[in-house]
Image: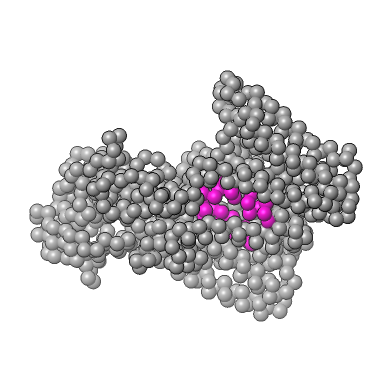
Amino acid sequence: MFVWDDLAAFHLPVRHLYREALRTGDSVLWTPALFSGAYLFGEGQVGMAHPFHWLLYRLLPLGVAFNVELVSSYIVGLAGMWMLLRRRVSDEAALFGAMVFAFSGFNLLHLSQMNAVAIVAHLPWVLLAIHSLLTSSTRQGRAAAFAGVALLLASQMLLGYLQYVWLTLVAAGCFVLWLLRGGAPTSRLVPLVAAAVLGVCVGGVQLLPTLDVLRHSVRAVTTLEFRLSYSVPPINMVQFWSPYALASVGHDFGVYDSAFSTAALAWLVVRWTAMKRRDLILGLLAFAALALLLALGRYGGVYPWLAEVPGLASFRAPSRYVLLVHLAFAGIAALVFEDLADITRRRERIDVRRLWPLAVPLALNLATTVTAATLVESRWATAHELALSGAARAGVGSALLGATTLLLLMAGRGVRWAVPVLVVLVAFDLGLWGYRYAWRIAPPQTIDEIAAMVPLPDAARPGDYVLPIQGQEKRNIPVLRGFRLSAGYLGLNPRATLDYDDPLAQRLAGVAWRFTDAGWVRVEDTMPRARLISNVQSSDRIAEDIRHIDIAHMALTDRAVDGLSGEPGQARVVTDRPGRIVIQATAPGTQLLVLTERFHEGWRARDGEREYPALRVDGDYVGCVIDAGTHRVTFTFAPASARNGLWLTIAGLALTAVSTWRLWRQRRFR
């Protein structure tokens, strides 16, 4: 399987935890394997509540399920874009445009963000459903489209990456404006808005936990600088005509979408008066320009205003608006391809002198290639922090654009075989650009090979807590071998009172092993999984005060805990499963039972019919006060956000079903 970037660093380990919970019947809400405990369900990017994911990871081996999930997004995106484009162009042109969308520079470069690509795959289906809802002449068609909008949006919500749901809404909003301009009745906006609201409700089982996790994460409050990070630098615009002139283009900054997409813009200049659906082309060009302006982020002047909008302030990476640029390019590609196919079928021969605009991108490319080769490793390039390519690498882009231009010229002259060759060339171009990271930097590996990427101490055993090694790409890997981590890597890292790298914090977390310059060393005097404490102080400066106490015999809480007495009793772990921990505790007096599990308001502690309030102890951990005697205390993770989200989903599904039935039965609908 592919292991590049987040695939091995994030997605595979958390899906392993998800599958193990399904297999053993444990709670999927919480995992003790990351950050000494994390509300993993609310992290969202596993998509635990999505029926497709549940089926995959419940029924299939991990490797098979992972690959099916990864590949299926591109298939779904391809099919959806084909269905959408068929509304305006021929089947063959629609298929070509669908290929340009599904395997666009954005989608392939974001292979490692598999949930993002999965949500993007819904985008053409959402637009198709909106088109049907606003234009269908039959009540059955409108009812089906209503349900489609609601369920597709819900499916996106269940995949947990809200920024890409927002990008879908941006595209949908622009699409609705275009349909209204074309004569769609404004009365249809009422069911459309209702469908969108119901879609959000159906996705509530994921939305509310995600908002809960966000509230407790390091992203709860962000700076403008954070929101503007990963803005596309203007220099990256050279990718449109010379993609390989820059020596290093990270996947977040890739704007290239094949030489054909660039040459197609020149073709529009050549054929503007003869092109069909010029209003649609103008709409797509305007949409692409707007999206590109937003992708520039801090450099475009508009995004800083958008970044202040409530609800969007947790998002970063304006570069992700490149997705919408490539969506528009796919539509333009289909329209240009249809024009090329019509010309060759009619054996039409365009005057060569009229084809001169095709030379403009090629001239820009050659000028950029020569400039890059001349300035590579020069003082000027170093001073301006520009990593430029030599002639050989930059020349790859020249060859691709040159071949594309030649094939366009030949098609314009009526050469029929130029069109199918062009399809092959575009597929090769997209694959070369999009897959270069996945193959060159991190070739595919097996799960066992991935798990072995991080050597662990011979004396360590599965279930031990370890401090993850430095480096985001390997932090989560030990969970594949059954180890638990005191830190980790998530999209929404939980906010902590104590620094994970602090030796004192590691002792409090029960860390058994930490990695140092000398290799793995055992952590001495680490806290047991459960312990009883009779000496507790309240503090509003726990991070400072905890350095002045003996953590083995004293604890700090954020509220007063009175009436404790006696020597610390005994606590024994009976059950230690995700979201459920059972402790057998014997205390000579009222005492504080403390776990090395991360605190969250969703923890519930019970002894039979009696419930104990869960307390935040030592800043980050969960505990409760028990009376004298022997108790069997069960800690269960049952957050209100998951419960309320489930009820919201049930209500959303019921209302969607009722609304769809009423639309189906309605005789008059304007």
Q: Is residue 394 among the parts visible in the rendering?
A: yes
Residue at figure coordinates x 75%, y 56% from the top left: 93
Q: Is residue 618 among the parts visible in the rendering?
A: no
Q: Is residue 118 magenta?
A: yes
Residue at figure coordinates x 76%, y 45% from the top left: 264
Colouring mode (rainbow / by chain / secondary structure / one colour): one colour
**The C terminus lies in quadrant:** bottom right
Residue 163 position within the rendered picture, expressed as x and y whole percent measured from the top left = 54, 51
Residue 641 position within the rendered picture, expressed as x and y whole percent measured from the top left = 41, 62
Considering only vertical position in the picture, is 214 above or below 543?
below
Position of 45 with respect to 233 (left or right) is: left
Q: Which residues are magenta?
A: 98-126
- Residue toward you, 378 or 390: 390
Position of 534 with respect to 236 (left or right) is: left
Residue 123 position within the rendered picture, expressed as x and y whole percent measured from the top left = 62, 58
- Residue toward you, 477 or 152: 477
Q: Is residue 86 magenta?
A: no
Position of 603 with respect to 408 (left or right) is: left
- Residue toward you, 635 or 534: 635
Considering only vertical position in the picture, is 138 above or below 465?
below
Tell me where residue 657 sits by quadrant: bottom right
Residue at figure coordinates x 72%, y 76% from the top left: 668
Tell me where residue 294 sits by quadrant: top right
Residue 534 position within the rendered picture, expressed as x and y whole percent measured from the top left = 14, 53
- Look at the magenta stretch and give its main secondary structure: helix
